[in-house]
């Protein structure tokens, strides 16, 4: 399991602030790369190394998820969590820095808990989603 660095709160805050100004783009700022980028900022471990640089549009993202995990966002989250020893937790126990699959009107999205919300990549930067919309969550280090 990746271990959080001592200064992870500052690193996470800086990463989220930068992502909030980044437009959505498959392959550079989408839900998978945002959430795993936050984990990398906190731990130094890139959990999406295998997927990074393999797609640039919605069709490519779907194909990459299918090739990687045999499904979509949820299946990819389950596989990454299993491969890296992230412990699944009940959503009410999710805390700042934990990774979550969030229910959105467009379907499931991978996000990161900020403490009061889950942040997910959105058309303009990030969307802050109420914690009650978390479908699954995993503890990060």
Image (cartoon, helix red, strand yellow):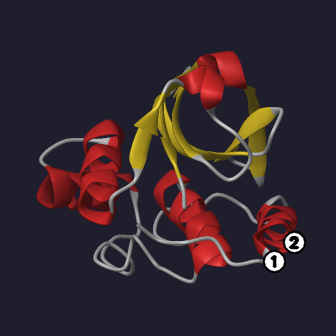
> In the shown orientation, is residue 95 left or right of residue 141?
right
What residue is rendered at 25% in x and 41% in y? 75
Residue 134: x and y in percent read: 57, 25
Residue 29 visible at all: no
Determine which quarter of the picture holds residue 140.
bottom right
Determine which quarter of the picture holds residue 111.
top right
- Front-lying residue, 93 or 56: 93
Residue 18: x and y in percent read: 83, 70
Tell me the element at label 1. loop
Q: Are marks 1 and 2 in contact (CB under 8 Å)?
A: yes
Report the quarter where the C terminus lies.
bottom right
What residue is rendered at 75% in x and 39% in y? 127
- Front-lying residue, 7 or 52: 7
> In the shown orientation, is residue 78 left or right of residue 137?
left
In the orientation shown, which residue stands out farthest toward the top?
132
Depicted 53 relative to depicted 110: above or below: below
Residue 31: x and y in percent read: 53, 52
What residue is rendered at 25% in x and 53% in y? 82
10 Å neighbourhood of mark 1: few (<14), some, or many (≥20)? few
The residue that disc 1 covers is 7
Tell me the element at label 2. helix
- Front-lying residue, 54 or 112: 112
What residue is rendered at 47% in x and 57% in y? 32
The residue that disc 2 covers is 10
> In the shown orientation, is residue 45 left or right of residue 72?
right
């Amino acid at each position: 399991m990746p271990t959080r660095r001592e200064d992870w709160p500052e690193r996470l805050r800086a990463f989220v602030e930068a992502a909030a100004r980044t437009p959505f783009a498959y392959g550079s700022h989408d839900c998978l790369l945002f959430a795993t980028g936050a984990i990398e900022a906190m731990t130094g471990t890139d959990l999406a190394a295998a997927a990074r640089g393999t797609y640039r549009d919605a069709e490519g993202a779907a194909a990459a998820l299918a090739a990687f995990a045999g499904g979509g966002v949820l299946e990819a989250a389950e596989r990454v969590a299993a491969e890296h020893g992230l412990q699944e937790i009940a959503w009410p126990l999710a805390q700042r820095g934990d990774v979550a699959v969030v229910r959105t009107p467009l379907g499931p999205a991978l996000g990161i808990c900020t403490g009061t919300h889950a942040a997910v990549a959105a058309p303009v930067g990030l969307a802050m989603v109420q914690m009650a919309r978390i479908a699954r969550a995993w503890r990060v280090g």
